[in-house]
């Protein structure tokens, strides 16, 4: 194995902490960066014991601490996951959305350019496709975001493509679809739908479905997304560009609620609320390009993934 030094921004978050664990267990050296705004120290409990792990508590958009860290540690790859994850919060707090989902990308790209970092892997999103009805969504589908979150992620992709053209940076934007699994913060109203549903069902609290519930998502287990990120970060040659990380299968919100409910016989019926602003109706991705480029294939079925979530 070719050992690398890999910097992971957003290391204490849901996806980031799993990425850190996987990279360490594969023998890589990891520099984790996080300001703990939505992530938590607890997610890094295992990693903290590892001698190949260094952690920097830093907001990458404030001061030049991040740039100095890149200069000192000279990673082979930066996996940039730090960001604002909630579409809904992005609508309510546009300045925060663009600072975390666009400006932070600019700072990462700039540090990579200045210090000759080999590759940047960026956490983009299916939200860049917007309300496209051209399903399943392939990377050839148009980028037409319908919310500020998708707009910031799409602009980040374009910014990185500019650094590829002008400075020869190797930049890989991974468009994650709806990621779920252990460590997704269930306490935040801005968390992913599956962790909110499981958390509320466990506590006997009511569940609200926004809209009619027939909206669909390509739900992907965090373990599969982590495999895709690690492949994109460590494979020898990965061409710069955009790649979907998805399963190629979609499920409606109502079906997933009914499936989870079977495990909670006393659960109440779901309540229905107004559709969320900026909500996409149907989302389903085509994973072919990531398979061809770096061998990515989702392996966890929704049934297995929900079982793991319920047992976590
Ligand atoms: P998360 O909120 O658990 O992780 C984000 C992490 O970034 C947190 O630990 C947070 O503390 C950190 N962070 C935020 N701003 C920071 C800053 N300025 N400086 C340093 N650290 C900062 O969310 P997640 O689900 O793990 O998402 C990770 C990335 O993947 C995000 O960029 C998100 O937009 C993207 N993404 C997530 C999903 C999903 O379904 N969860 C889907 C598509 C894309
Ligand atoms: C999610 C991710 C986003 C990512 C995108 C990619 C989160 C929080 N957001 O956005 O980062 O870029 O996938 O596809 O993980 N819903 C309910 N009741 C609830 C909560 C949600 O009905 O209590 C509905 C929403 O209205 C939506 C669906 O469930 O229709 C999914 O919502 P959510 O988990 O927030 O994800 P996305 O908005 O798709």
Image: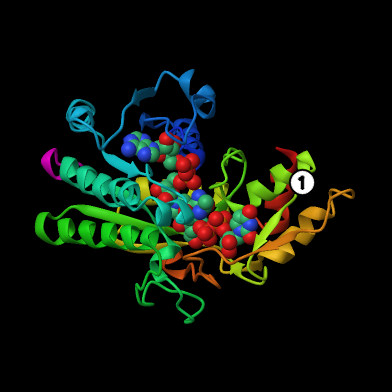
Question: Which quadrant of the frame does ligand 1 lie within?
Answer: top left
Residue 115, position as x, y percentages in the image: 14, 38
Total numbered labels = 1
Is 40 colored magenta in this rendering?
Answer: no
Q: Residue at x 69, y 50 (%)?
A: 197
Q: Is residue 16 above or below residue 125?
A: above
Q: Is residue 88 above or below residue 58?
A: below
- Whether residue 290 appears in this view of the structure is no
Crowd band around label 1 with a 10 angstrom C-alpha radius: few (<14), some (14–19), many (20+): many
Quadrant location of the C terminus in the rendered image:
top right
Q: Which residues are magenta?
A: 113-118
Q: Is residue 30 above or below residue 92?
A: above
Instruction: Give the residue number, with chain letter if any, for mark 1.
Output: 201
Q: Nearer the viewer, residue 170 or 184?
A: 184
Residue 175, position as x, y percentages in the image: 41, 60
Q: Is residue 243 left or right of residue 254?
A: left
Secondary structure beneath dot 1 equals: helix
Q: Residue at x 34, y 53 (%)?
A: 94
Q: Is residue 17 left or right of residue 250?
A: left
Is 117 colored magenta in this rendering?
Answer: yes
Quadrant location of the N terminus in the rendered image:
top left
- Whether residue 281 appears in this view of the structure is yes
Type of secondary structure dominating the magenta stretch: loop
Q: Residue at x 85, y 54 (%)?
A: 262
- The image quadrant that residue 260 belongs to is bottom right
Residue 124, position as x, y percentages in the image: 38, 56
Please identify the residue farthest to the bottom as the structure is shown. 134
Q: Is residue 298 left or right of residue 127?
A: right
- Ligand 2 has an atom within 8 Å of the beta carbon of the residue at disc 1: no
Q: Is residue 188 above or below residue 276?
A: above
Residue 221, position as x, y percentages in the image: 59, 52
Q: Nearer the viewer, residue 17 or 216?
A: 216
């Amino acid at each position: 194995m070719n050992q690398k030094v890999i910097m992971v921004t957003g290391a204490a978050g849901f996806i980031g902490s799993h990425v850190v664990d996987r990279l360490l267990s594969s023998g890589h050296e990891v520099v984790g960066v996080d300001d703990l705004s939505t992530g938590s120290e607890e997610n890094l409990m295992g990693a903290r014991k590892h001698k190949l792990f260094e952690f920097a508590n830093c907001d990458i958009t404030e001061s030049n601490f991040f740039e100095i860290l890149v200069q000192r540690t000279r990673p082979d790859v930066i996996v940039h996951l730090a960001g604002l994850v909630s579409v809904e919060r992005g609508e309510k707090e546009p300045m925060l959305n663009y600072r975390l989902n666009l400006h932070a990308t600019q700072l990462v790209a700039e540090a990579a350019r200045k210090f000759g970092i080999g590759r940047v892997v960026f956490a983009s999103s299916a939200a860049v496709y917007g309300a496209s009805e051209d399903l399943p969504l392939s990377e050839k589908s148009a980028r037409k975001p319908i919310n500020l979150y998708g707009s910031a992620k799409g602009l980040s992709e374009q910014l990185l493509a500019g650094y590829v053209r002008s400075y020869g940076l190797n930049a890989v934007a991974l468009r994650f679809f709806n990621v779920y699994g252990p460590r997704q913060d269930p306490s935040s109203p801005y968390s992913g739908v599956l962790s909110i549903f499981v958390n509320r069902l466990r506590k006997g609290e009511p569940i609200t479905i926004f809209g009619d519930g027939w909206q669909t998502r390509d739900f992907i287990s965090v373990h599969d997304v982590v495999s895709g990120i690690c492949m994109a970060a460590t494979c020898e040659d990965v061409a710069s560009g955009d790649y979907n990380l998805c399963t190629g299968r979609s499920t409606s919100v109502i079906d997933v609620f009914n499936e989870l409910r079977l495990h909670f016989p006393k659960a109440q019926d779901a309540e229905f609320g107004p559709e969320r602003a900026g909500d996409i109706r149907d989302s389903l991705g085509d994973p072919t390009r990531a398979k061809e480029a770096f061998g990515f294939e989702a392996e966890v079925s929704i049934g297995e993934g929900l079982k793991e979530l319920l047992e976590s």
